[in-house]
Image: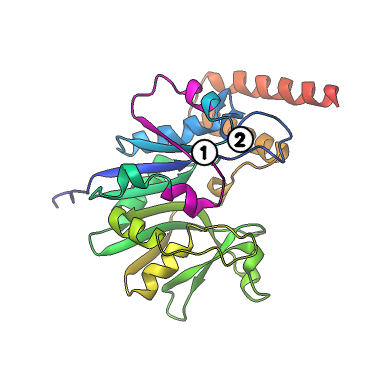
């Protein structure tokens, strides 16, 4: 069977966050996992999936992030002056991408456990008639994640952020780990219509999915990643857990660096305890 030719695809990577709960001045995406910044893993996954250009949205301590990746010629830096939500972050890329006639991945820079295989699944599931495709997973403890809402037939109906869930919706275990693939022009048309009528008073990227559905466009959701891959990093405890998972992956691949990074991370953790 002849391989289906995919449309040109770029990526928007959200990397403007502040490390409030990490209690450091380091931009969140520069915290290291096995000796490398978290953002590096997301960039690598995109490259391995065939993405040629990444638009990285930075905000807090932006120059420090840019300096870390100064040698990467496939990155376009986009500045988000105020962090007004994920939808607003993507909209900051409008001057670069609004007229782009292809597909756009939207990913989070604090999700280093992403795999290129998941991105490839999204690309395979997407087609010319689909406005958006998202990758989901199922968690036993979905606390804090947006819930995937489906109808009685299993069709995707939307995403509700945890803080906005009803008592019934909070019981749903299928979650949104923030892996999106959009028809680019439809994405930016929909972004212009979102509002901040929610608890956080932010512009949610997930609201573009509801707008697309209301306009009878096709949005699909595929369970495409293992539960552990959904873990993002917001605390030092989560960072330690992600380091352990990544070290395990490296050991599985037989990497000689795995033991080294485990020792380095353990030393960092011990040093942190000593400073307390």
Reply yes or no: does residue 73 show up in magenta. Answer: yes
Element type at mark 1: loop
Q: Nearer the viewer, residue 128 or 211?
A: 211
Mark drawn on residue 142: none
Which quadrant holds residue 242? top right
Residue segment shown in magenta: 65-91
**Residue depicted at 84% across the width and 22% down the height:** 274
Mark drawn on residue 15: 1
Mark 2: give few (<14), some (14-19) or many (20+) Cα within 10 Å.
Answer: many
- Is 131 situated above or below 237? below
- Is 223 situated above or below 41? below
**Mark 2 and 1 residues: CB-CB less than 8 Å, in contact?**
yes
- Which residue in the structure is indicated by mark 2? 28
Which quadrant holds residue 8? top left
Residue 178: tell me if it is visible: no
Residue 114: percent from left, percent from top = 48, 42
Element type at mark 2: helix
- Is 243 situated above or below 156? above
**Residue depicted at 32% across the width and 35% down the height:** 53
C-alpha distance separating marks 2 and 1: 8 Å
Which quadrant holds residue 211? bottom left
Count up the numbered dots. Answer: 2
Residue 78: percent from left, percent from top = 43, 37
Asked if residue 262 lies left or right of residue 188, the reply is right
Residue projecting furthest to the left = 2
**Residue depicted at 37% across the width and 62% down the height:** 190
Residue 187: percent from left, percent from top = 35, 57
Mark 1: give few (<14), some (14-19) or many (20+) Cα within 10 Å.
Answer: many
């Amino acid at each position: 069977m002849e391989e289906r030719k995919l449309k040109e695809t770029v990526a928007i990577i959200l990397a403007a966050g502040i490390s409030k709960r990490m209690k450091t001045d380091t931009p969140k995406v520069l915290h290291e996992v096995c000796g490398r910044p978290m953002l590096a893993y997301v960039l690598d996954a995109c490259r391995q999936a065939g993405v040629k250009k990444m638009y990285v949205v930075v905000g807090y301590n932006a120059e420090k992030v840019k300096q870390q990746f100064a040698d990467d010629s496939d990155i376009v830096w986009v500045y988000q002056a105020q962090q007004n939500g994920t939808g607003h972050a993507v909209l900051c890329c409008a001057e670069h991408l609004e007229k782009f006639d292809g597909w756009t991945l939207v990913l989070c820079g604090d999700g280093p456990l992403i795999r290129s295989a998941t991105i490839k699944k999204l690309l395979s599931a997407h087609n010319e008639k689909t406005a958006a495709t998202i990758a989901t997973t199922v968690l036993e403890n979905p606390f804090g994640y947006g819930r995937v809402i489906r109808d009685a037939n299993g069709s995707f109906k939307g995403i509700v952020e945890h803080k906005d869930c009803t008592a019934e919706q909070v019981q749903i275990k299928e979650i949104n780990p923030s892996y999106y693939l959009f028809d680019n022009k439809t994405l930016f048309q929909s972004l212009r219509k979102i509002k901040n009528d929610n608890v956080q008073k932010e512009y949610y990227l997930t609201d573009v999915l509801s707008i697309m559905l209301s306009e009878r466009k096709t949005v699909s959701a595929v369970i495409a990643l293992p539960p552990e891959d959904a873990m993002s990093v917001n605390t030092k405890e989560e960072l330690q857990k992600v380091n352990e998972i990544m070290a395990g992956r490296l050991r599985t691949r037989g990497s000689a660096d795995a033991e080294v990074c485990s020792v380095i991370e353990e030393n960092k953790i011990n040093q942190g305890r000593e400073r307390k």
